[in-house]
Amino acid sequence: MKNNLRSPLAKAKALGSAGSGTATWWAQRVSAVALVPLVIWFALFMLKAIEYRDIELITTMFGSPFVTLFLAFFVAIGLYHGNLGMIEIIEDYVHCHSMKMGLIILIRFLSFVTAIAGICAIFVIHLSTFNFN
Amino acid sequence: MEQQDTQTLHKNRPLSPHLSIYKLQLTSALSILHRITGAYLYVGLVVLAWAIFTLVYFPYILEDISDCIYNYAITRIIFKFMVLSWTFSLFYHQLNGIRHLFWDVGKGFDLKTTYITGRIVVILAILLTIACWALVCMYQTPVEMIIIEDNIIADSQ
């Protein structure tokens, strides 16, 4: 009965009653799938780094473009996924509207700035392994 | 007057999931733990990214911070507990996340499977955490023992 009242256009768009779609839900799942191998790699990377102990030795690991890119991806996608998750938590538990908006803006800003700072630093370590003569 | 009363009534009425009146079950406990570990992982990742940033641009500040942590027994224990719980959170969130992805494609929804996978996730997460920290302890002991032996030799000479 209810389904019959929906227009063909609404059915084709498949956006439901909220009207704004499921983009965030999808983004969260896709970043989750990307993080599955990245987290396994990160655990192995940290174990290797702890085995090396010495900061000079750990820096030599960043000579590999794969280590650099994987760590950059882990920080970027991890922060993106965490950003969406934290916003979901805030939306669920903070009921005061102005506080909710303030916290969401704060989390978005923090995630963005942290990702840029972290990725810049990772690439600086990568560049420091080159010999510029 | 009557309108005001209904307004306060509307404000004070309980919200839909009624979390406080339900008995905590494995499924709901794991669901809440997924959120808590997720938030904790986010905080840890932000700290990790800024730690790498500080290591590159202000290494002396990172040295001061690590000195501050390692000079006192309390901060040392708190730091170790935080890293240990972060490791557990990483493995738990990873495994439970895979469980969630299976649910998203519509598999493993019946009650029996949900309880079995829930138990597997918790046990595997604990085992992986123990395995990782056993490896870390194995890496660390020989080097520390060598340093202590060197110091003893240096003192005796």
Image (spheres, coloured by chain):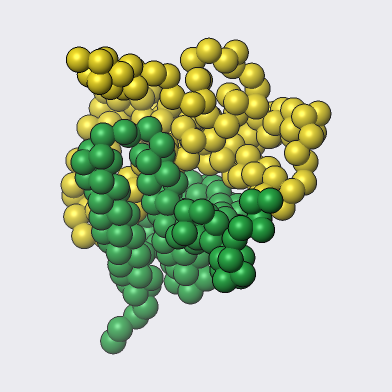
Quarter holding residue A30: bottom right
Number of labels in the image equals 0
Q: Can residue B11 be seen in this snapshot?
A: yes
Q: Residue at x 39, y 51 (%)?
A: A83
Q: In this structure image, what is the colour of chain B?
A: yellow
Q: Can residue A54 be seen in this snapshot?
A: no
Q: Nearer the viewer, residue A16 or B39?
A: A16
Q: Nearer the viewer, residue A50 or B3?
A: B3
Q: Quadrant of the C terminus of chain B?
A: top left
Residue at far front of view = B2
For residue A113, above or below residue A97: below
For residue B34, above or below residue A38: above
For residue A87, above or below residue B155: below
Residue at far bottom of view = A133
Residue B93 in picture, x, y percent from top left: 56, 40
Residue B33 in picture, x, y percent from top left: 53, 30
Q: Residue at x 61, y 69 (%)?
A: A8
Q: Residue at x 50, y 65 (%)?
A: A70
Quarter holding residue A126: bottom left
Q: Is residue A33 left or right of residue A77?
A: right
Q: Is residue A7 left or right of residue A50?
A: right
Residue A130 in picture, x, y percent from top left: 37, 78
Q: Residue at x 60, y 13 (%)?
A: B23
Q: Quadrant of the N terminus of chain B?
A: top left
Residue B22 in picture, x, y percent from top left: 57, 15
Chain that is coloured green in the picture: A
Q: Nearer the viewer, residue B77 or B13?
A: B13
Q: Nearer the viewer, residue A85 or A49?
A: A85
